[in-house]
Image (cartoon, rainbow, N blue to C red):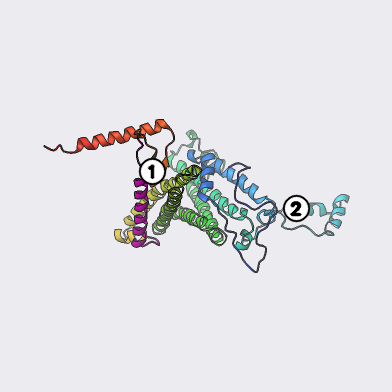
Amino acid sequence: MSDGESVPSAADGEVLNMNEDEFIPSNFSIAIHTILNEAQQSHGVPHKDYTQYRTYLTSRLARIRHAKPVIKSLSHGPKRAKPAGAGGAGASTGASGSGTGASKKKGAKHAFQHRETITPQQANQHVNFILDGLYSTERAWAHAMELKAVYEEVVSVSVDESNTKSSFALTKKKTSPGKVRQHYLNRLKKAVNHVQKLEDIVQAVCDGNTNSEMKCYAAWIKGNYYCEISDWKNACQQYALALQLCNHISKSISKSASTMNLSLQEETTTTTTEAESLQLSDFFHSRAVNIVQPLLRYSKYELEQEGNYTRDEITSLCHVGESNDDQENEDEEDNELIQQKLNANKFDNDSQLSSIIFRGHHVSIDESNIRKLFFNINTAKEELEHMSKPSSK
């Protein structure tokens, strides 16, 4: 994301809900996974260049912390202005050059100061308080992945380090692989600490969609940490929660897009919104299938290999929060929506498709060449089904 990107925030200098007696949530809406996915795709994560990603996150955090409404709370510099008469004696001492007043003043000006713990009341004033915790979590995770890559490279190389170009081999001070591993585990633990604090703040000041995304992201971060320290029980629980939330978010977006499309089919202005909703729903579905589910399957296997739990106990352990009745109701609603769209989706007189059904979504096709391709596919399917049926004699 660039410096001029648009994020939900209050205007410069604007402070929300200053009345401390009555806490009114600002209900910030933050697309957490969309923001992080765009940042990762643009800054080296697809190529596993976590150093570039961590550098970007450091710069991004500096910009967030130095915004005018939050600079006194999020920066590590002086928290408040000095009194009017406080600088007189020090200024005269520094001008004369006698004593150590000048050095003390310079050191105090640039000294590092610890930040106070961010409270929900503070976070309710500006969205940058939440973005600071989010990017801090992501930076700790990126640093852990960077160190893990170094650790894996060190373990895989031979004893002769002269032929390797790894950053570990080129360091002047030799460090054991165990220390490198402990370093990246500490960074993962720090990411867990960041996300736990952020989860409580988001629950207090953000809307329901942001809450669901935050819980999903937090479960994934915690699952990664438990997986690295071989705590397979907690890893299974966290990955199962992340998988459930990914599927829930994908279905909720799909249902909202389907309802909007069925009620406003005649309006052309909803095409962009429908496409964006389809893309977002597909993102969460892909994340659940391609990222979270393999990690959950691996954690289940390792937990079963320990011998402390049976397969049925592991299966019941991974069922988080939802009963079978709720799942059946959701499946019935999805089937009804799909059936409505199938009934509404018809072929044109010129044997060209005007729309298709993709993962429960009604997607219109504007290009004539693409319509012909889909029509040829459907025609080939019909011919194949006709040929596979036994001929009646």
Q: Position of residue 222 (x, y in %)?
A: 47, 56
**Precedes in sequence: disc 2 or disc 1:** 2
Q: Main secondary structure of the magenta part?
A: helix
Q: Is residue 154 above or below residue 205?
A: above
| Label 1 packing within 10 angstroms: few (<14), some (14-19), many (20+) | few
Any part of residue 391 in sight: yes
What residue sits 34% from the left and 49% below the top?
Answer: 339
Name the mark on residue 130: none
Asked if the residue under mark 1 is in contact with the one under mark 2, i.e. CB atoms within 8 Å, the reply is no
Q: Residue furthest top?
A: 369
Residue mark closest to the camera, 2 vs 1: 1
- Give the percent coordinates (x, y) of residue 212: 48, 56
Residue 295 magenta-highlighted: no
Q: Image point 61% across, 59% down: which residue?
A: 123
Q: Is residue 277 left or right of residue 129?
A: left
**Which quadrant, please, contains the C terminus?**
top left
Is residue 329 rendered magenta in the image? yes
Instruction: Give me the C-alpha separation between circle 2 and circle 1.
Output: 60 Å
Residue 51 vs residue 64, the one in the foreground: 64
Judged from this view, the residue extending furthest toward the bottom is 21
Q: Secondary structure at mark 2?
A: helix
Q: Which mark is residue 358?
A: 1
Q: Which residues are magenta?
A: 319-348
Residue at left offset 28%, top offset 33%: 380
Q: Secondary structure at mark 1?
A: strand
Q: Residue 50 in the image: x percent, y percent?
A: 52, 42
The disc placed on residue 109 is 2
Is residue 142 visible in this depiction of the protein? no
Q: Nearer the viewer, residue 177 or 190?
A: 190
Q: Is residue 3 left or right of residue 225?
A: right
Query: How far across and down, in percent of the image, does residue 305 sit?
Result: 32, 55
